[in-house]
Amino acid sequence: MADRIDLVSRSLEDTTQREFDRRVDEQAARLTDAVRAGRLDNPSFGLGIELEAYAVDDTGRLTRVPDTVLEGPCEKELGRHNVEFNTSPNRFDGDEATVQAAQLRRRYRRVQQAAEQADTEIVLDAMWTIPPREGTQAYLSDVREREGVTIAENMTPSARYWAIDNDVLGQTEGAITLSVPGAEREFPSILFESLASSIQPHVQVPDVEAFPRYYNTAIRTLGPVLAVATNAPLLPPDLYDVDDPYRVLEETDHELRIPVFEQSINQAWEKVCFPAEIQRTAETIDTLVADPTCAPFLREWLADGDRETLTDRFWELNHKRGTYWRWLRAVIGGQPVGQGDHWSIRIEYRPLPTQPTIAENIGFQWLVAGLVRGLCAADHPLVSLEHDAAKRSFYSAVKNGLDADLVWVTADGDRTTDRAVLYEELFAFARRGLRMQGIATESIEEYLAPLEARWTARTTPSRWKLDRVREQLDAGMPFDDAVHEMQTEYIRQARTGEPITQWP
């Protein structure tokens, strides 16, 4: 504990920040040279995913992840109640994508079995709403001071997490506010970010010269894809202070994860935001270097030895990327998928909430990868859509889900706000991209058809949740109980493995 606190204190020193930034500049220059030399070219597209979840006890209340669970194929995340699954990246072609899907299923199943033995359950959900026994405010505000460092008791014990927390708190005079319809709260830690869970599909692009087109095209898809994914419409009910719960249901965002994450950080710096487009691949490095430094760590504090591996040679730059929280970001310089000793460049697609079932989470991985691949291979004119229009579409999806005001440019070059036209083309090009990568039609339909059914049935997890709470209110149930009942039913239905469109 003392060693971790010492690391936090050192990370916030001006001398540390200057040395960290100097090393970032040097590493960025080397990586830029590699980009210009074409060393990021690879033989194939690649695919990966990160999937976050949370733990509940046998009554459905939020609880810490047992240590025995963390011994399985999963990782710790920000909160002690969080867990993350990662797949080993595969080539994005043929059977490799289905192999990765099977790998994710196996890992989730193993972790869930370990959780059951500890009388807990790992829930695939975008925001927990049944609070722990002490209540949400108390749980998220349980902090203590030690040697000038703020320690959030329910944050995973990590020098990196503590340093980020204390750096943000130092910029905000020790308090961070959360303001959403019906709730105005103040917290002494960024831990309230752990209310939410997400998925992050990764797509490796083999051609460094083509990367700007893939990246800029992906930006234009963020709003429409998020609109069919929304799954976080409500905070835990004990955070609300309202006389009219119907008004909360009417005014709330369909995807509260976005404002929760933005507000947990952006009161210090505007780091969590809609991405800018790029013209050159090297711009992704320039924008990363220009981003405000948060909680700098020097490699020798954590590891000794020479900088021989790629990761060690770019340690500080990769650490800085870990606090570059755009809703779409480039990851440059990692080990590639496929054969060869080149590095890689990939897109990390970050705004999507965790979905109720493994199949639906895989579905969004395939939707994102297939869509970006299909659009770019067809030289689709969507990339011509104005950046501001794409940004408005994104935040409208955050607010309104499937009712969002979305803008699209069709394959014929026509600008449209007709969501029926948009989604017909979106799923068509996603299927096209998957077929181009050699994925069988049967597999494509297994994972994409349930997502397309959300549009045709006008159903998303967020809509399902709001409808269930409204039904309980209509039956005379108090707001807190209505949310509790909805969440209990959500967990029960998610266990079946059926897609959301099949839930009663």
Image (cartoon, helix red, strand yellow):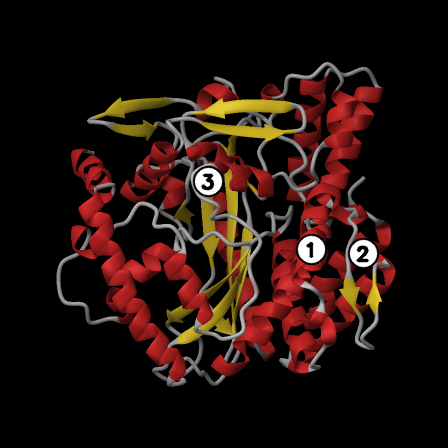
Residue located beneath label 3 in the image: 265
Residue lying farthest to the left in this orientation: 305
Between residue 422 and residue 485, name the one nearer to us. Answer: 422
Q: Nearer the viewer, residue 351 or 236?
A: 351
Kind of residue sitting beneath label 1: Gly
Quadrant where the image shows the N terminus = top left
Q: Is residue 227 visible?
A: yes
- Nearer the camera: disc 1 or disc 2: 1
Q: Is residue 14 above or below residue 100?
A: above
* Residue in the picture at 22% in, 44% down: 14
Report the residue marked by disc 1. 223
The span from disc 1 to disc 2 (Cα, nearest Å) is 18 Å
Q: CA distance from mark 1 to mark 3?
A: 22 Å
Residue at figure coordinates x 41%, y 80% from the top left? 40
Could you tell me the amino acid type at mark 3? Ile
| Residue 235, horizontal then vertical, whole percent | 61, 30
Q: Secondary structure at mark 2?
A: helix
Residue 122, above or below 119: below
- The disc placed on residue 453 is 2
Q: Earlier in the sequence, mark 1 or mark 2?
A: 1
